[in-house]
């Protein structure tokens, strides 16, 4: 794999510092039990200067031309009847970049792209986000209270997160069975809700690992509660979980904590190195608890 700078393989995880579009080509067909990740949100954030970085796409169309190569490989390596969960949000447009202020249907485009590759639209959950915090962070015109007094035709609601889940066609040959003891009805009712109001936006690996200020921070790490619920619901112990956009290792951290195996790819070297530290720390903790 020409673009892989670093890699580490253990009995519980394999991680690669390289382009996931290339790394996934070397994984066996129908070898992955579950995939969960947060992809680059088109060009909303820039993670690196690499031409291979999806976040560096010049246009929205260029982003999708690149991303669709990955989706094809994701379908091939996933076991029949199993799932891919994509953490995403719709994207605010700007007058400077797009010529108008509005919202891009990124969530819908994700669903359609995965359907085009053969996936079935399985489910989704809307994850509530505080519009006040979003306004303070982004200074979005539509969320400002002063805009209501000026002209509310430009006022809008906040933009939530989504966990969109797609399913590969075919029968699942390794049923994921739960008991009333480990998955009581009250828990299922919470997970089955189409809106999750109780996700703590600060419960991320970035906060939990208490990293120093000179460590590079992941721009938008996926909340650990979201990963935990998806892995609990859609995997068995010992299953292989994949993240093609590993970041600092959030999905792998939860997977190992729950005694699953993990494969991750990350293009940015600083994120990869932090992910390696995080995975080693949780692996050590999990094995110490087992002993």
Image (spheres, rainbow, N blue to C red):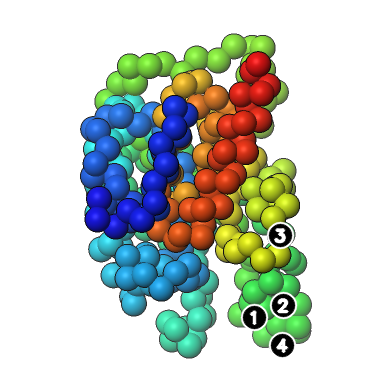
* Nearer to us in this view, 250 or 96: 250
The x and y percentages for residue 76 are 24, 38
Q: Secondary structure at mark 4?
A: helix
Q: Nearer the viewer, mark 3 or mark 4?
A: 3
Q: Secondary structure at mark 3?
A: loop
Q: Residue at x 44, y 84 (%)?
A: 97
Picture layout, residue 276 above or below residue 82:
below
Q: CA distance from mark 4 to mark 1?
A: 11 Å
The image quarter in which residue 129 lies: bottom right
Viewer-side label of 1, 3: 3
x, y percent for residue 29: 23, 32
What residue sits 63% from the left and 27% below the top? Answer: 286
Dots 2, 1 in contact, CB < 8 A: yes
Q: Which residue is mark 4?
A: 150
Does residue 134 appear to the left or right of 100 in the view shown? right
Q: Quadrant of the C terminus?
A: top right
| Residue on which disc 2 sits | 144
Q: Give the class, few, some or many, for how many residues have Cα within 10 Å of label 1's Cα (few <14, many ≥20).
A: some
User: N-terminal of the two: label 4 or label 1?
Assistant: 1
For mark 1, what is the residue?
141
| Residue designated by label 3 | 212
Q: Nearer the viewer, residue 251 or 231?
A: 251
């Amino acid at each position: 794999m020409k673009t892989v700078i670093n890699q580490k393989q253990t009995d519980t995880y394999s991680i690669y510092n390289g382009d996931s579009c290339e790394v996934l080509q070397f994984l066996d067909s129908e070898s992955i039990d579950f995939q969960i990740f947060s992809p680059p949100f088109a060009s909303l954030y820039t993670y690196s200067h690499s031409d291979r970085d999806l976040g560096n796409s010049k246009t929205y169309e260029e982003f999708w031309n690149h991303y669709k190569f990955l989706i094809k490989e994701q379908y091939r390596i996933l076991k029949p009847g199993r799932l891919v969960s994509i953490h995403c949000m719709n994207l605010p447009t700007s007058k400077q970049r797009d010529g108008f202020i509005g919202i891009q249907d990124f969530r819908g485009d994700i669903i359609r792209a995965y359907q085009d590759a053969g996936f079935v639209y399985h489910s989704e959950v809307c994850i509530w986000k505080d519009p006040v915090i979003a306004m303070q962070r982004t200074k979005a015109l539509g969320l400002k209270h002063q805009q209501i007094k000026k002209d509310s035709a430009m006022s809008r609601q906040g933009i939530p997160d989504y966990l969109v889940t797609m399913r590969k066609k075919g029968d699942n040959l390794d049923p994921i069975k739960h008991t009333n003891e480990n998955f009581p009805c009250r828990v299922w009712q919470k997970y089955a809700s189409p809106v999750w109001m109780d996700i703590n936006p600060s419960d991320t690996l970035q906060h939990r690992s208490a990293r120093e200020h000179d460590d590079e921070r992941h721009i938008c790490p996926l909340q650990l509660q979201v990963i935990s619920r998806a892995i609990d619901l859609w995997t068995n112990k010992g299953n292989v979980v994949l993240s093609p956009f590993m970041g600092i290792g959030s999905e792998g951290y939860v997977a190992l904590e729950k005694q699953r195996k993990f494969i991750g790819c990350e293009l940015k070297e600083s994120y990869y190195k932090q992910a390696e530290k995080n995975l080693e720390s949780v692996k050590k903790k999990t094995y110490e608890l087992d002993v």
